[in-house]
Image (cartoon, rainbow, N blue to C red):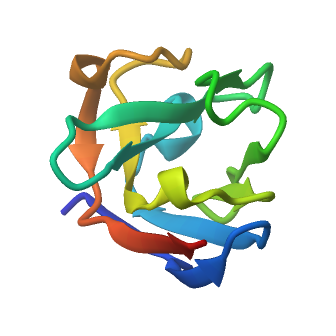
Amino acid sequence: QVQLVESGGGLVQAGGSLRLSCAASIRTFSSRAMGWFRQAPGKEREFVAGISWSAGIPVYADSARGRFTISRDNAKNTVTLQMNSLKPEDTAVYYCAAHRLTWATIREDDYDYWGQGTQVTVSS
């Protein structure tokens, strides 16, 4: 059974940091790209960051570039999103997702497995 379990969300003040982790029970984890998406209240889910199967050049949304860092550990089947300099507009539920293929893309439809999400709240 495929499972993606996010952790590390919480409440933080603006300017602070959080580290999100995703533990994946996918047999093909090391051959899949992985991504993080988020959904703020009243908004559609949006791409945040993605990383290829080999942890090559990551892909970031403009809103995340320079503040967030995505990484993965194929030996542990985990993917991490380090978020620094957080802003109130980063408040959202953050989802980990497994891509169908090896190279990260920004399209939600390219990801076929999703976690339940973890809440990140940034206070001003």
Give the vertical position of 80 relative to 5 (above or below).
Answer: above
The location of residue 32, given as percent across then percent down, is 49, 31
Q: Quadrant of the C terminus?
A: bottom right
Residue 13 sits in quarter: bottom right
- Residue 83 shown left or right of residue 95 in the figure: right
Residue at image coords 55%, 76% = 123
Residue 17 sits in quarter: bottom right
Q: Going by the picture, which residue comes out furthest to the front?
A: 124
The location of residue 70, given as percent across then percent down, is 71, 44
Q: Is residue 10 visible?
A: yes
Residue at image coords 33%, 23% = 100
Q: Quadrant of the N terminus?
A: bottom left
User: Between residues 77 and 9, which one lies in front from this camera angle?
Assistant: 9
Give the vertical position of 102 relative to 37 (above or below).
Answer: above
Residue 4 sits in quarter: bottom left
Residue at image coords 77%, 73% = 16
- Residue 7 shown left or right of residue 76 in the figure: left
- Residue 21 shown left or right of residue 73 in the figure: left
Q: Is residue 79 visible?
A: no
User: Between residues 75 and 110, which one lies in front from this camera angle?
Assistant: 110
The location of residue 83, given as percent across then percent down, is 72, 58
User: Between residues 81 and 27, which one lies in front from this camera angle?
Assistant: 81
The tally of labels here is 0
The location of residue 93, given as percent across then percent down, is 34, 61
Residue at image coords 31%, 65% = 117
Give the vertical position of 116 relative to 108 (above or below).
Answer: below
User: Between residues 48 and 92, which one lies in front from this camera angle?
Assistant: 92
